[in-house]
């Protein structure tokens, strides 16, 4: 596809949505919640509606300088905002709008990606895909601009897959009359490779995980199979239910029929809510999994404490409501309903251990994944381990935890 075609694609995609409803206003709440929402906004520490994952995004491959330039353009915009306090609520698809600015950066990388050959071109296109994905973040259901950005992200990822030296295969797994779309990343197809199933949070697309394969797993000749959580990305047809691991279980059971992977050597890595799903899977299918790693996973604490959930940002509440498919939200009933996702409340982390060795990690002071959650997971796993990554080295926290994660998987998968 030529550069002009790409520009045209982005223009056609967004032209109908010049005045699309702004993301922070998409979720409808009960009138009785208004006071609580106003209070959250006034008392909130942040000047942004979205939680800014600066460290995560730069780890995933966004240049920190480019990121700050985008955020500065959004912050400095003179256009009208839905909420003056929140810098990223610029209305309409034009300069200063969140989706517009991140899409623009994505287009720059996409242009370079088409001009460069081989892996250089591929890496630019993977970066473009990540920019488009952030343009759609947090990927709320009825966010038309986010859906268009997701289309661009998917296209850039497929273009990158054609240029990279690695092998990327789209895998489709039948499930309840539809198909789960996963992507398998391999260093070669000469012989079946050990494989790690990777899943991230409820606000992340599976294409965002590229760097984990390129910089970590590929160096050990371990394949990576990415799966979106129910209700997001390719898995958006399925609502999120208490059975958070249902799609991953279907994918796991499909592995024996995939010729490029060794289904006797399967590991799991789950970030955020993906960690909840993959710990659950480690109890559902203990004989099929060699090792599991979770990072920042909500396991019990925040899910079973309505008061803690109510202290979360509005973006987080909007996200949970969207994932549960709620038309109109009542914060109190939403907070109560989340208890069903606690693996302790489900009785999973209650009596029997799993034979899967689980390494459960989070950064110090993480409100979503306190150390007590990780200790709980470690307690019910044979050889399980809980690890707190010190906040003093938070910029190296990601690298440090990933090094530990890869070592943990390597010890179990390659021995």
Image: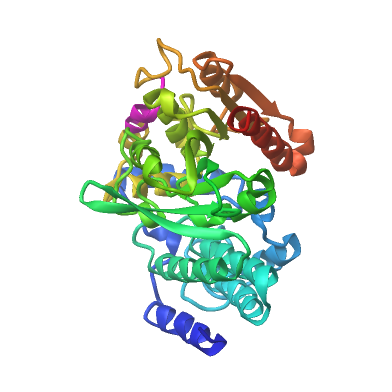
Q: Nearer the viewer, residue 1 or 147?
A: 1
Q: Residue furthest bottom?
A: 4
Give the image location of residue 305, x and y in percent: 44, 25
For the C terminus, give its image quadrant: top right
Q: Nearer the viewer, residue 267 or 80?
A: 267
Give the image location of residue 262, x and y in percent: 49, 39
Q: Residue furthest right?
A: 392
Question: Is residue 294 magenta-colored?
Answer: no
Q: Is residue 215 above or below residue 116?
A: above
Q: Which residues are magenta?
A: 336-344
Give the image location of residue 55, x and y in percent: 68, 49
Q: Tell me which secondary structure the magenta stretch mostly adopts.
A: helix
Give the image location of residue 412, x and y in percent: 60, 28
How many marks overall?
0
Q: Measuring 66% from the left and 78% from the top, which residue is drawn there?
A: 112
Q: Measuring 31% from the left and 43% from the top, which residue is drawn there?
A: 32
């Amino acid at each position: 596809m030529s550069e002009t075609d790409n520009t045209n694609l982005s223009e056609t995609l967004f032209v109908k949505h010049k005045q699309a409803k702004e993301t922070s206003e998409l979720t409808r709440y009960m009138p009785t919640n208004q006071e609580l929402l106003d209070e959250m906004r006034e008392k909130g520490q942040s000047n942004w509606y979205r939680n800014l994952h600066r460290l995560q995004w730069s780890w995933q491959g966004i240049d920190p300088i480019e990121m700050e330039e985008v955020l500065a353009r959004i912050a400095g915009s003179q256009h009208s905002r839905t909420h003056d306090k929140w810098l990223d609520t610029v209305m309409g698809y034009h300069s200063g709008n969140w989706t517009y600015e991140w899409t623009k950066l994505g287009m720059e990388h996409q242009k370079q990606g088409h001009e460069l050959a081989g892996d250089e071109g591929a890496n630019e296109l993977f970066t473009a895909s990540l920019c488009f994905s952030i343009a759609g973040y947090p990927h709320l259901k009825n966010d038309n601009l986010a859906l268009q950005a997701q289309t661009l992200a998917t296209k850039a990822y497929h273009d990158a897959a054609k240029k990279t030296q690695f092998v990327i295969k789209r895998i489709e797994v039948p499930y309840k009359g539809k198909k789960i779309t996963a992507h398998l990343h391999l260093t070669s197809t000469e012989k079946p490779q050990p494989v790690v199933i990777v899943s991230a949070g409820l606000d992340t697309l599976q294409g965002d995980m590229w760097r984990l394969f390129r910089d970590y797993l590929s160096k050990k000749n371990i394949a990576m199979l990415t799966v979106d959580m129910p209700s997001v990305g390719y898995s958006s047809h399925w609502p999120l239910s208490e059975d958070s691991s249902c799609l991953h279980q279907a994918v796991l059971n499909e592995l024996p029929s995939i010729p490029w992977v060794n289904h006797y050597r399967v590991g799991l890595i789950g970030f955020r809510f993906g960690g909840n799903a993959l710990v659950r899977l480690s109890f559902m299918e203990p004989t099929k999994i060699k090792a599991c790693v979770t990072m920042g996973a909500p396991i019990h604490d925040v899910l079973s404490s309505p008061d803690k959930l109510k202290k979360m940002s509005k973006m987080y509440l909007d996200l949970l409501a969207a994932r549960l498919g709620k038309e109109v939200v009542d914060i109190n009933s939403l907070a109560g309903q989340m208890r069903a996702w606690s693996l302790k409340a489900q009785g999973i982390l209650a009596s029997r251990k799993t034979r899967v060795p689980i390494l459960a990690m989070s950064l110090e002071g993480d409100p979503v994944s306190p150390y007590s959650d990780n200790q709980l997971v470690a307690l019910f796993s044979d050889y399980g381990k809980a690890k707190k990554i010190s906040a003093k080295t938070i910029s190296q926290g990601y690298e440090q935890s990933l090094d530990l994660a890869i070592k943990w998987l390597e010890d179990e998968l390659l021995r």
